[in-house]
Image (cartoon, rainbow, N blue to C red):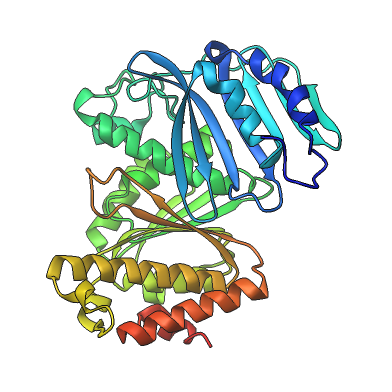
Amino acid sequence: MTGRPGSAFAGGIALEQLKPFAESIDVAGLVKLVFHAPQKGSPYKKVVGRPVFVRRAAMVQFEQFTEKQAFHRNVPAEGLAEAVCGYLPEHFKKLSVQTRQADYDVYAVPGGVKVVRRGHAEAAAPDVGHDRAKRYLLPEGAVVEPLVDLGVFTAEGKVVKAKYDKYKQINRFLELVDDVTKDMGERKIRIVDFGCGKSYLTFILYYYLKEVCRFDISVVGLDLKREIVDHCNAVAGKYRYEDLKFVAGDIKDYVPDGDIDVVLCLHACDTATDFALYNAIRWNARAILAVPCCQHELNRQMRTDTYSILTKYGVVKERMAALLTDVIRANLLELNDYEVQMLEFVDFEHSPKNLLIRAVKKAMSGAAKERAAREIDAVLKEYHVEPTLCGLLGRPT
């Protein structure tokens, strides 16, 4: 790549300067690459690269984040330099490189690139297995009581072989939360978990943010069942998690006693997710993570003459209803100044309910809001549906 025509990088000067540095990156000593500060017009918001082994071959796995999705691609070790030069400066203004020896910041500047060494990283050697040895936020070796009680860890902090899929799912969830909380540490972070159930994820999240990240946090778990709430409060007491409380109540009626930073809603059935999102919007929550479940409402309502083939078969109609429900929710969040991504929470083979809506508070442009409103209105008219969240927020015009 030689840069976009007319840019400060046209002619390949920056790439010529970047290539020697890129070729010097040793995958064996690499911990992480992060491309950020996207160039205007780039389809990517951020790209993160980590070393992995795939069938015993050393590679770097790049996770590419767009506005609403995340994609993965594996690059052989010998192709790393070319991949780095493909992202910077064409798509990004800055690259951060963490190795076992030192950290580097690479800046795309007019007429070239600037490399700044930031000293010794003192990072642990990365686990580079594609599956069993991937570098996780909760690595083996630490005795994490909730993971032991859940049966995922042994008493010595080793992953139970039969629970490895669950271990990966938990770490994936922590990665998704970590992305939206890492810049929130300036004051106490207040989190509400709607429909928490037995709350193993709530306990693990609390441990990660409190004990690993050292954030000052408080977490409230809400559930309809009193026996579940009593059980969870007893477990929190056993773990000495002083700022983790559970209360019995309905999502519709919950009133917090202060500002809320993060709202979680994992597998709340049908319209319960809508009430959780509505509350999060009303409270101006800084981040929302929701995994919708059992979206029956639109399945009962939807009908269309133009696209009748999509409602002809029951199983297809059910999936279409779920997808329509979630994209309408996403657009309604955009209308209320949230930047939204749709991400896979777990592999499809583990659960068909694998979409996670991640929304971060951000002032959206008037043009983006107008487009979101038009898209919602077109879907509502075509499929003759009236979702609960539209009624709660008011139908967009």
> With 177 as the anchor, is 119 left or right in this view?
right
- Residue 362 visible: yes
> With 273 as the anchor, is 351 left or right in this view?
left
Quadrant housing the N terminus: top right
Residue appearing at x 52%, y 32% in the figure: 212
The x and y percentages for residue 145 are: 35, 31
In this rendering, the count of numbered labels is 0
Q: Nearer the viewer, residue 69 or 359?
A: 69
Residue appearing at x 76%, y 31% in the figure: 12
Q: Farthest residue to the right: give it.
A: 111
**141 shown above or below 194:** above
The x and y percentages for residue 201 are: 35, 45
Residue appearing at x 47%, y 87% in the figure: 395
- Residue 215 visible: no
Query: Residue 253 falls in which quadrant of the image?
Result: bottom left
Residue appearing at x 80%, y 47% in the figure: 6
The x and y percentages for residue 38 are: 68, 46
Query: Residue 276 falls in which quadrant of the image?
Result: bottom left
The x and y percentages for residue 353 are: 27, 55
Q: Nearer the viewer, residue 204 or 124?
A: 124
